Amino acid sequence: MRSLIAAIAIIAAASVIAHADPDPKRKVVVLEYRSHSSALKGIAARIQETMGKQTSLQLLGLDQTRTQYGADLDAALVKCAGEADCLAGIGHKVGASDVVLVAVSELGDVILTIQRIDVSQKKAVTRIADSLPAGAEPTEDQINGYLARLLAPTDFMRYGVIDIVANLPDAIVTVGNQSRGKTPIKPLKLPAPAEYVVKIEKEGYESFTSRINLPPDGELKVEANLSLKGGERAWYAHWYVLVPAGIIVAGATGATIYYVTRSGPSDTVPVMGTIE
Amino acid sequence: MRLGLVTALACLAACSDGSGSLDLKLSLPSQDDLRPQGATNVTVNATLPGETPISSTSAIEHNAFSTGDLPAGKDIQIGVVLRDVSNRIVGIGEASDAIDIANDKATSLTIPVRRPFVYAADGTSTTAGLQSYDPTLDARDPKYQGTIAGIASPQFMLSVGGDRLAVVTKTQVLIVTTATNTVSGMVTIPAAPKDATAVPGTHKIAVASTSGITIVDLDSSTVQTAAVGDVDRVTAGPDGTGKNYAFGLIDRVVAPALPPPLGACTGTSQLVAVDVDAPATVAPKSLNMAVSDLAASPDTPALFASLPCSGQVAQLDGDPSNEVSTLSLTMLTSVERAAVLTVSGGRIWVAGTKSAVPSCANSVGDVSPSNCGVTSAGPTCDTDGEPTGSTNPVVWADTGAALVVASVSYDGKDVVEVVAPSRRQTILDNGDTAAQHAQDLKPITAVPLDLVTLPGGQYVSVVAESYYYIIAAYSGATPILPCLEYHTNDWLLFDFASASIAQRVRTFCGGDFKPTSSFFGPWACDAPPEAETSSVQYKPTSVGALFGAR
């Protein structure tokens, strides 16, 4: 409650207390604190979900934090009453670098405050506050705006890695219409998510082409076995061949990972499942 | 919302035009202690015959998931891995049989998913029971170690599809249902087992004994024995036609415990190949070399051997099932004192020992490693704490022995080696009320007794035994410090991602001090750190893992 009052005092103002370039893959806990309000149900989960889409941060929601912290997390959260140093203690216990506290209260309007607490400094480095009409929900654009002010700009830069391995040296590698040198070639760190066309060419051999959807924080391995021209058509030149490239490393962000495949009619099936 | 994103991302890659789908039901145990906890993402692995496995991962939302596409086809082996938010494996599942996936109809599949428990047993004990370790938990968690009730004299533990664990005891094969960790069936075997292995792609196990090789079908409870002689070790895998064989090692040469030049290592081993579907008596073939262990690839016709005397891993060439074919060994890589090995994930995993450097005393009492020879006495003491024997006796370890585990590609070119730091054992003077007088010993032997790879290939579990020795210290005729002869047994988990020991439990420590009348004493093992303390004192001789390869 004490920090809530402080937050109300800065309604509609983004107060950036400190600005550095923190690790874009650091662990961040997203917690929700309510002061006698049932408005904006699931707002912390929405904010966490948007953070998950836009950043590479390792995010822990309330349930995941409870798993690590213990069943008394909720009591500890209430006891902290929004105090940064107290909340930093929760973050420290679960090994997080930041705690994002989403607080909801009502003062006529619904008051939404979001603060990012640096666990090591034990203080809020950014605070956002907004007032919303009763019954209204923040739009996606509004949440994007909150996060743009809450997080460091470097948190929104995401990359993936394409590791290209060919069976022959000196084959020319082109990725996204840019020449990247000749094989053997070091893994390429590229902005993601994005689609890239990988082409590997060598005179006298069938060219290898693959269209890749590179997800953020994923590492795709493209293995190209170039075949001599003139013989049977190279196996990878057939339409039905699944190009043998796949993500070999992925972060714990939960983003979908998939193999690089040909476009067009598919011999593949979607996989769904339930846990019982 | 997240689920929608997941699906959308998946479809960026390739969405099927047909109406086909693969609908998975992951069946988890209902008991909290057995049920995988904290899973946040799932990886579905599909292996088509002769193809590189294909993986697809997605987040789990409200106990449901939707991953990217997987190829349709026949005889596809499906497996799943559940990970928590820190990417630690918390659950593993494998379909019990390969399935056909059509791209024009829905395919449903139920997969049992379990925590990747590791099991260890003391084959010489009638009281220790079957011990379990849960590597998904912190080592200090009270549920990290456990004892599975109702199993007496376990010898070997084999994962059969994950939903069942076959525990080979001295007289029976017990079938443990892993959803409840209760015994659900048993099959009597004709002789005490010396080794056992699961037959890949089947629900059968092969048991080695003095009677030969026994094939046990866990579904039909049938038992067939091929009387091929006294078999020490057994492994199973396919030949070039896909037919499964159980390969038995006869006249096994155990990796010597003592370091060179103390321990002699000689012998010639033999191999016998038994058709799993039609076990019959066949003649063994000489390998013309000392072999400590065999391991067959589960999916390709390849058989590997560990050679303890030359310290090498070799591939066996020739057709063991062909009576007129000769056998030869092709060396792949060096692993000192190679003792045990297995094959998993297209790689060979072998455990050996970086030998200790012993120090020995010569006839005038000078101590040096250079005084040691094959005929050196010890390392044991008489009742006065003096070395037993008079020929350049061993007095202590100058450099301690260390365990080594290597992962080797089939062609031997890609070798990853993890050497465990040579551990030391503190023996405390219990007569010192301050509990500060101590001797800090280096192991003169460290022998891996068994190993198993955990699913995923990142972790390898090893059980090992070490021996610590130092002679008594005298001041004139008065013994100040006694000779110490102590053994420890350990269960270890090697992490190949970080090239380190991820977890370790000291399961036993005990020994003798001589003379008992020395100035300091009596002596006893120092307690290990909390995370390394065993809930049961036992000497594990074998290790197994759910979904693991042994």
Image: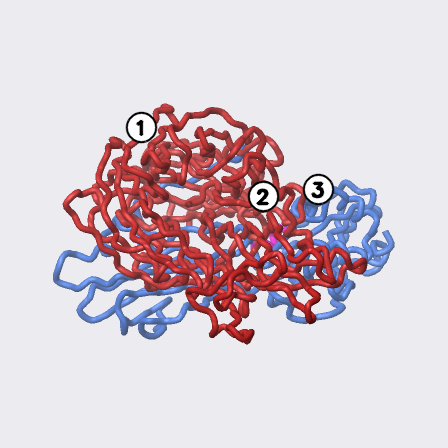
Cα separation, mark 2 vs mark 3, equals 54 Å
- Quick check: can you spot residue A92? no
Q: Secondary structure at mark 2?
A: loop
Q: Which residues are magenta?
A: A48-53
Res B538 label: 2
Location of mark 1 (residue): B224
Chain drawn in blue: A
Residues at badges 2 and 1 in contact (C-beta under 8 Å)?
no
**Main SS type for the magenta part?**
helix
Q: Do badges 2 and 1 share one subunit?
A: yes
Chain drawn in red: B
Amino acid type of the residue tagged 2 in the rendering: Tyr
Q: Residue at x 33, y 41 (%)?
A: B231
Cα separation, mark 1 vs mark 3, equals 64 Å
Cα separation, mark 2 vs mark 1, equals 33 Å
- Quick check: can you spot residue B488? yes
Chain name for mark 3: A
Location of mark 3 (residue): A41
Residue closest to the far front: B477
Looking at the image, is mark 2 or mark 3 nearer the viewer?
2
Amino acid type of the residue tagged 1 in the rendering: Gln
Residue A50 magenta: yes
Q: Quadrant of residue B133?
A: top right
Question: How many C-alpha atoms fall within 10 Å of the one at disc 1: few (<14), some, or many (≥20)?
Answer: some
Q: Secondary structure at mark 1?
A: strand
Residue closest to the far left: A230
